[in-house]
Image: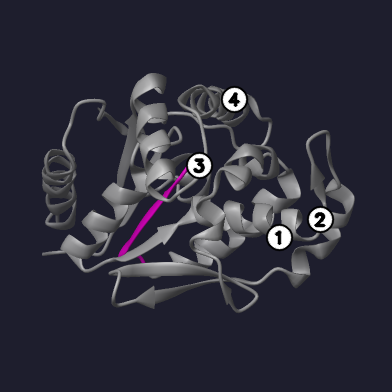
């Protein structure tokens, strides 16, 4: 008998978690939730409201503003995935910019923000049939997820991917700056006190440094179908 499951995909930045999760959700007809986009949305809000500077984050005011931050996902049939909306505004493109990437790990390390967004994520996934990617999905949000994947790749490979992606979007960035950002985010994500990035014992690790998009999808799709078909 087939069963509905939760698929948790965690891992370092720029490992292609979102790409894999989107492809997998589409193949299984599951709901895809990009939890990293939720933290990016909060970061974008903070930038827009001058709560972040290079040397300071006004955590107290940002925490006070959390009740004024409404994050929604709305499916775009033309793109084939759900886009992120902040207080009714589509910010899918804005949250992918480098200036958001430079601060998102610091914002995600704030316990009060994590608590609020984790509660939202659990509510979204309560009926299962979801593919959710992020940093703490298998460890904190859904520790009982039926399938946990941990994505990794070398920092240099991840930085190159991100660099080419930003260039394609017209951003003026250097590879060194992107690599520095990747390494910085790795450190913050792994060392933060609130829900650090870890590989749980029951997670299946996939190094996709040299895997094609199709190869990694086939690999995880087989794993998912096996879990779904278990009685």
**Residue wearing tag 1:** 45
Q: Residue 184 carries which label?
A: 4
Q: Is mark 2 in CB contact (under 8 Å) with mark 1? A: yes
Q: Please tell me which residue lies in front, 131 or 181.
A: 181
Secondary structure state at the residue bearing disc 4: helix
| Residue in view at x 51 percent, y 50 percent | 36
Q: Give the range drawn in magenta.
A: 128-134
First in sequence: mark 2 or mark 4? Answer: 2
Badge 2 local density, few (<14 within 10 Å), some, or many (20+)? many
The label number, if any, that marks residue 211 in the structure image:
none
Q: Is residue 201 visible?
A: no
Task: Relative to 182, say whether 104 is above or below.
Answer: below
Q: In which quarter of the image is residue 166?
A: top left
| Left/right of residue 17 with respect to residue 54 in the rendered view | left
Relative to 35, 88 lies left or right? right
What residue is disc 2 on?
Answer: 62
Of marks 2 and 3, the one in the foreground:
2
Quarter of the image with the C terminus is bottom left
Q: How many angstroms separate mark 3 from mark 1 (CA)?
A: 22 Å
Category of crowding for the residue at label 4, using alpha-carbon neighbours closer than 10 angstroms: few (below 14), some (14–19), many (at least 20): few
Number of the front mark, 3 or 1:
1
């Amino acid at each position: 008998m087939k069963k509905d499951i939760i698929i948790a995909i965690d891992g370092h930045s720029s490992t292609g978690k979102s790409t894999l999760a989107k492809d997998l959700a589409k193949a299984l007809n599951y709901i895809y939730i990009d939890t990293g986009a939720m933290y990016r949305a909060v970061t974008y809000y903070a930038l827009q409201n001058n709560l972040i500077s290079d040397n300071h984050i006004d955590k107290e005011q940002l925490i006070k503003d959390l009740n004024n931050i409404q994050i929604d996902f709305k499916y775009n049939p033309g793109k084939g995935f759900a886009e992120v909306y902040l207080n009714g505004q589509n910010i899918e493109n804005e949250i992918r910019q480098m200036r958001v990437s430079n601060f998102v790990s610091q914002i995600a390390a704030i316990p009060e923000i994590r608590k609020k967004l984790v509660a939202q994520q659990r509510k979204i996934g309560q009926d299962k049939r979801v593919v959710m990617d992020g940093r703490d999905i298998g460890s904190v949000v859904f520790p009982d997820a039926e399938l946990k994947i941990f994505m990794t790749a070398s920092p240099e490979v991840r930085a190159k991917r991100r660099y080419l992606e930003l260039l394609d979007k017209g951003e003026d960035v250097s590879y060194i700056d992107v690599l520095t950002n990747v390494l910085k985010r790795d450190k913050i994500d792994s060392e933060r006190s609130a829900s650090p990035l870890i590989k749980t014992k029951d997670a299946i690790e996939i190094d996709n440094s040299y895997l094609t998009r199709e190869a990694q999808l086939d690999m995880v799709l087989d794993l998912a179908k096996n879990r779904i078909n278990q009685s």
